[in-house]
Amino acid sequence: MRTAPDLRTATWRKSSYSDGAGDECLEVADALPGLVPVRDSKNMTGGVLVFRAAAWTCFIGAAARELRPAQ
């Protein structure tokens, strides 16, 4: 069984991939080696998803490819 990381002292930052209007905002915490905790910035006491860093990198890469304009 895996234990959840202690996020009580995590320092959160808004993702550069978030909507600038504040409607669709993610926050990530950086100080956990190998892990990327993600939460909804509008619901800071809600749930947190914790990804392995490699999985998060793959997800961001795929999302960026999907958002590129067709050439």
Image: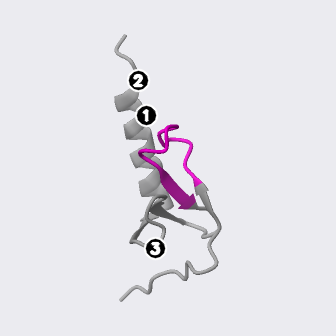
Q: Residue at x 42, y 46 (%)?
A: 24
Between discs 2 and 3, the one toward the N terminus: 3
Q: Residue at x 43, y 65 (%)?
A: 43
Residue 64 marker: 1
Q: Residue at x 40, y 85 (%)?
A: 2
Quadrant of the rendering where the N terminus is positioned: bottom left
Indicate left or right for 36 with 9 as reference.
Answer: left
Figure quadrant of residue 33: bottom right
How would you rate the neighbour count of disc 2 (Cα within 10 Å): few for under 14, some for 14-19, many for 20 or more?
Answer: few
Q: Would you say residue 17 sits in the magenta stretch?
A: yes
Q: Are marks 2 and 1 in contact (CB under 8 Å)?
A: yes
Figure quadrant of residue 31: bottom right
Q: Main secondary structure of the magenta part?
A: loop
Residue 45 marker: 3
Mark-to-mark CA distance, 2 and 3: 33 Å
| Residue 69 drawn above or below residue 15 | above
Three-letter amino acid code at disc 1? Answer: Ala
Q: Residue at x 41, y 56 (%)?
A: 55
Indicate left or right for 24 with 27 as reference.
Answer: left
Residue 35: % across, % down? 52, 67
Depth check: give the residue in front, 29 or 3. Answer: 29
Q: Nearer the viewer, mark 2 or mark 3?
A: 3
- Judging by the rendered image, the residue that carries numbered circle 2 is 68
Residue 65: % across, % down? 39, 30
Depth check: give the residue in front, 58 or 37. Answer: 37
Magenta stretch in the rendered image: 14-28
Residue 1 marker: none
Looking at the rendered structure, the secondary structure element under dot 1 is helix
